[in-house]
Amino acid sequence: MTELKEFLEEKHDLYNRAEFIDTDPISIPHQFDKKEDIEIAGFITATIAWGQRVTIINNANKLMKLMDNTPHDFILNAKARDLYQFDNFVHRTFNTMDAVFFIKSLQNIYLHHGGLQNVFHPNNLANEEMNNVCLSAITNFRNVFFSIAHPARTTKHISNPAENSSAKRICMFLRWMIRNDKRGVDFGVWKNKDFNSSHLMCPLDVHSGNVARKLGLLTRTQNDWKAVTELTYNLKSFSDTDPVKYDFALFGLGVFEGF
């Protein structure tokens, strides 16, 4: 296990670097300085972060331009007439209808619920199982996000770990917002003792899952929330306070090294 930890630390150090930002979807929120702009840009970008990374970045940039490159101000002040400009937007299965609802729901969250960070607050703080803190936070957010009238089709774009989804994109977004290791990649703009880096769950997709299984960090064959829990518990044996830092290692090994 010592050799495996050293290997993961080495790969984490290699890939958790600012020079990789430009080719990653995290480059979109890095265009902004204001906390609310960062979190809105990060949330929207993470939502469409599947497929080719170049396409993800291009389409996320389109969405930022449609919001006048001031996402927080746009969200707060958007009127019905402003939403027509999202006509014909599409990223894979995320289309105009989804984009328009996202704007409306985010507006509701910022005007009536204290913003994105506030609705990602966990409820079951008495529960010592670390996976339940993150699951509770995501469940709270999802309940608020769909608390206003919404198209049924749009619910598929916000994963539900309570139904055993891996919730990869939400876990990635939470990593961006909460981790702060001073290395210039993750933002760490959300500071909350009740929901911090020790509670984060490792984003899990085909690449990271395959690498984790080859390294003996994951035995479950499906990429679901149970697998996320197993992987994160194993990573916590290497870093109890910041297990998801090894997401950089798993991702880099899978994408850049074909491990």
Image (cartoon, rainbow, N blue to C red):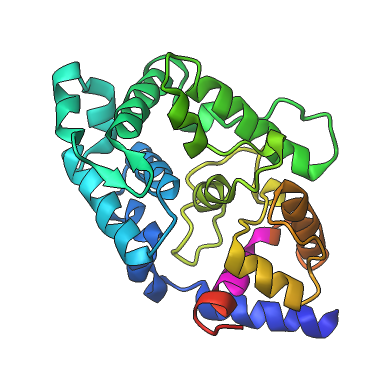
Kindly tell me whether residue 240 is visible in this rendering.
no
x then y, percent, for residue 10: 64, 83
Q: Nearer the viewer, residue 23 or 190?
A: 23
245 in the magenta segment: yes
Residue 258: x and y in percent read 56, 83
Which of 23/56 is in front? 56
Quadrant hosting residue 35 = top left
Figure check: 169 above or below 95: below
> Whole-percent x and y of residue 232?
75, 57
Q: Locate residue 23 relative to residue 233 in the image: left or right.
A: left
The residue drawn where x is 80% and y is 60% is 220
**Total number of numbered discs in the rendering:** 0
Q: Main secondary structure of the magenta part?
A: helix
- Span shown in magenta: 244-251
Q: Is residue 236 left or right of residue 22?
A: right
Left or right position of 99 against 181: left
Question: Which quarter of the image is occupied by the N terminus?
Answer: bottom right
Q: Quadrant of residue 11 in the image?
A: bottom right
**In the image, what residue occupies the spot 24% across and 45% down?**
64
Asked whether 12 falls inside the magenta stretch, the response is no
* Pick the front one: 209 or 35: 209
